[in-house]
Structures are given as C-alpha cells and as structure tokens.
Image (cartoon, rainbow, N blue to C red):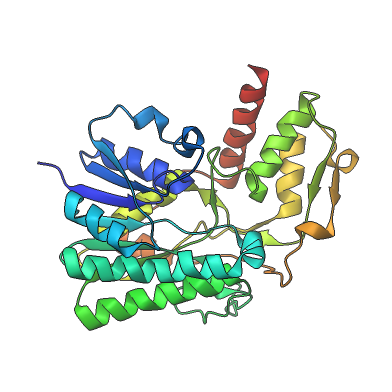
Amino acid sequence: MGKTALITGINGQDGSYLAELLIEKGYTVWGILKRNSVAENQTYRIDHLRNNPMLKLEYADLLDMASLVRVLQLSKPAEVYNLAAQSHVRISFDQPVYTAQSTAIGTLNLLEAVRLICPEARVYQASSSEMFGNNIDADGYQRETTPMNPVSPYGCAKVFSYNICRNYRNSYKLFISNGILFNHESPRRGSNFVTNKVAKETAKIKLGLSEKLVLGNTEATRDWGHAKDYVEAMWMILQHDKADDFVCSTGVSHSVQYLVDYCFEKVGLDPKKYVSTAARYLRPEELRDLKGDCTKMKETLGWKPKYTFETMMDEMVQYWLDFYSK
C-alpha cells in the first residue's frame, strides 16, 4: 500500500508539480484549498489531476487551526509538505500583516496540529533563499550556515517559519526538515513573477499582441532553477534518514537583464526597443544577489537538477508562444 501525503498550497506552482510526482510514485495525495469566491480558477494548475482517484482535496486554511486538525484527522498523512504562503516578495510590502500571518503563524498552526494529531508524520517546510537577504559568504554563495538577514516582510516571515520548525524538531523530536529553496520557475509560475512575466510578454510582443515590457530592478541577480527539479528535492529531503535543513539551488546566477536579453534574442527581437523600467516595480529595500551552494544536498541526498537556466526559459517562452498561437 502506498504512502499518504498532505500538501498545503497544492494549487500553486510547486504543489501541482509535487502532486504529480507523488501520484507517479504511488502516493495518495491530499491537498488543502483556501476557499476562493471564483472556484473555477482556483485549481487550474491541478485540473488535469482532478479525476485521479489518488487525489483528494479539502477546504482548509493555515490561519484556521480547526480546519487543519480536521484534514489531518481525515488524511492521516505519513508526509506533510507545507507549501502554502503569501509568496510574492513585492506584494509582501503591500500586505505585510497578512504575509506574516499566513507565512509565519500559519506554519506554527500546522506544526501544532501535526504535533497533536500525527506526530509521527514527516514534515517538509518550504523555506526560502529570501531569508538570507543581502548576506553573502566570502566566496559569493549562500549556504546553510550563511547568516540570515531578510530584507522583506516575506523573508522575515520565512525566517520565523524556519526557526519554529527547528524549534519543534528539537523540542518535540518531530521529523521536520527545511528546504531552503532558491528561485524556481516554470510555465506554471504566476505571471507577476519576473521570469514568467518576461517569458509571457516576450511571446506576446513577438506575436504582435503587446508592445512593451515594464520591469523593476534589472540589475538584480538570482539563482533560477526549474520547479520540477525542486519538488523532487522536497521529496528526497523527506526520504532522508534524519530531519535536517538543505539548500536547494543551481549554483549559477543570472541578472534580470540577462533573462530579458536571452528571451528576446530567442525570438529574434531587440529588447531595447520594447523594455523599460518603472519605480512602481521596485522594492522599498532591494535584495541584490542570490546564489546558492547546494553541495550538502548533492552529497547527502544525491540530488542533481536536470534543467539549466536556458532550457527552463526555452520551455517557458515556448509555452506562451504556443498558448497565444492557438
């Protein structure tokens, strides 16, 4: 009989890919949905799985502990993947209180519910490279031992979640692991995130459906990987023989400007003719550079990404070209 897993945030980018992966591995997958007034749009990333008997969806919310208790009692999971959060960094400045509640206190609610209902379950916490802020080790990388100094409400909330997970792991001997994931993208990424925003507008401009792309800080650099590779890392972290914390990254960073240039050159366009910047897309405090060292994960778990930055962006641009050509 296969394992049972519970995924919070199952209708997000990572949740949808993780659900696919776990179902392929024979899991029964439970997912929680936050009630949305437009239910038709809520599950579009997992609609192709809705008729699969291995997928079960329930309404619940990280801010409603009673609902979490109910779903844990129903599902009796062996593994819990906490992927739910207000995850857009720029928006966290506009909604700092909600970000702190959903991303930080929501994690605490889930841990407490697990402790009470299924303390034997293994828990994966989606931690973030945003926790490091502008702290970078002398060699230019960020790793598990790099001091955390976040520069956004989102990053601050994630540091709380990271530390409360370590606290519950040590205090109650629960199996709780943090995956400190660097930026990861795909065609399923929200189009208000810069990678998919660039890919989408590149395709629209190429097809004559748009005339401009407006961005914020194009000098910022990020370590971008593919969400498919990173959800496999999540699963591998929970299969390890002990709970621990792991950085997941590609070890290669690119600037937003390089991202733009690559996508436009792929379709034969000059970005200088179409791309501009606007102050409204800048963060009140900028995070300049992110580049992760995932040596620990590679050596301990044997993880290795299959995608490069270029093959990932090729897929994303092609997705939108196909989408708008239909």
The x, y position of residue 182, in whole percent, is 52, 60
The x, y position of residue 203, in whole percent, is 71, 30
> Hey, which residue is sitting farthest top in the picture?
326
Could you say which is closer to the camera, residue 178 or residue 271? 178
Side of 34 where 323 appears, left or right: right
Which residue is depicted at the point 62% across and 71% down? 152
The x, y position of residue 181, in whole percent, is 47, 61
Is residue 322 at least partly visible in the picture? yes
Is residue 246 at least partly visible in the picture? no
Q: Quadrant of the C terminus?
A: top right
The x, y position of residue 324, in whole percent, is 67, 23
Image quadrant assignment for residue 17: top left
Could you say which is closer to the camera, residue 167 or residue 51? 51
> Hey, which residue is sitting farthest right in the picture?
273
Q: Quadrant of the N terminus?
A: top left
Side of 313 where 84 appears, left or right: left
Image quadrant assignment for residue 179: bottom left
> Hey, which residue is sitting farthest front in the picture?
37
Which residue is depicted at the point 41% across and 51% down? 9
Above-or-below relation of 13 to 89: above
Which residue is depicted at the point 18% across and 50% down? 74
Above-or-below relation of 257 to 107: above
